[in-house]
Image (tube, rainbow, N blue to C red):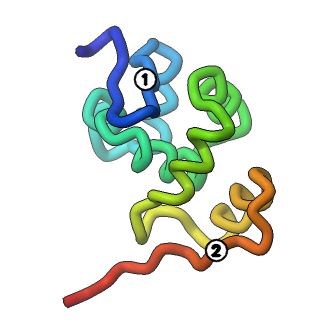
Amino acid sequence: MVGTGLGIGLIFIPLTPEIQAVARRVIWFEEPERALQNPVRFLAYAMTYATHEDMQMIRHYVTDEQFREALDQVPPGIIDQRSWAYWNLKFNRYPAPPLPVRQLP
C-alpha cells in the first residue's frame, strides 16, 4: 500500500513524503514502508529519536488517545528511560508505569 499509508489496529499513519522522511531518520536501518508496518514500534522509535519538527508531523495523524495506546504497547528495548518519563508525563500518566523490560528465556 505504498503511497496510501500503512498501519495496523486503530493507528494509521499515511506514507506521505514527509512521513517517509521522518521514518528514514528515526528508523534509519530499514525502509520507511517496513518501519510503518508496525505503527506502535514506529512511534516508540519516534518518541526516542524524533525531533520536535518530526513529532509535529506525526501529530497530524496520531491522536492523544492513540499515543496513549502506543505507550501501553511499546516493545521493550526501544525507548530510553528519559523519553519514557517525558512521554508519559506529556499524556498525564504520572507517575509513569515501569518501562517495558525484555523477558529472556
Secondary structure of residue under mark 2: loop
Give neighbour class at mark 1: few <14, some 14-19, many 20+ (Cα, 10 Å). some
Q: Quadrant of residue 17?
A: top left
Residue bearing the label numbered 1: 20
Q: Residue at x 51, y 30 (%)?
A: 22
Q: Residue at x 43, y 26 (%)?
A: 12
Binning the other alpha carbons within 10 Å of mark 2 as few (below 14), some (14 to 19) or many (20 upward) gives few
Q: Which mark is residue 97?
A: 2
Query: For the view shown, which residue lies furthest in the left direction?
Result: 105
- Left or right, residue 98 beside residue 73: right
Left-right relation of 84 to 72: right
Quadrant containing the N terminus in the rendered view: top left
Q: Who's the residue at 43% across and 23% down the image?
A: 20
Which mark is on residue 88? Answer: none
Mark closer to the observer (1, 2): 2
Q: Position of residue 37 (x, y in %)?
A: 29, 35
The residue type indicated by label 1 comes to Gln
The mark nearer the N terminus, 1 or 2, is 1
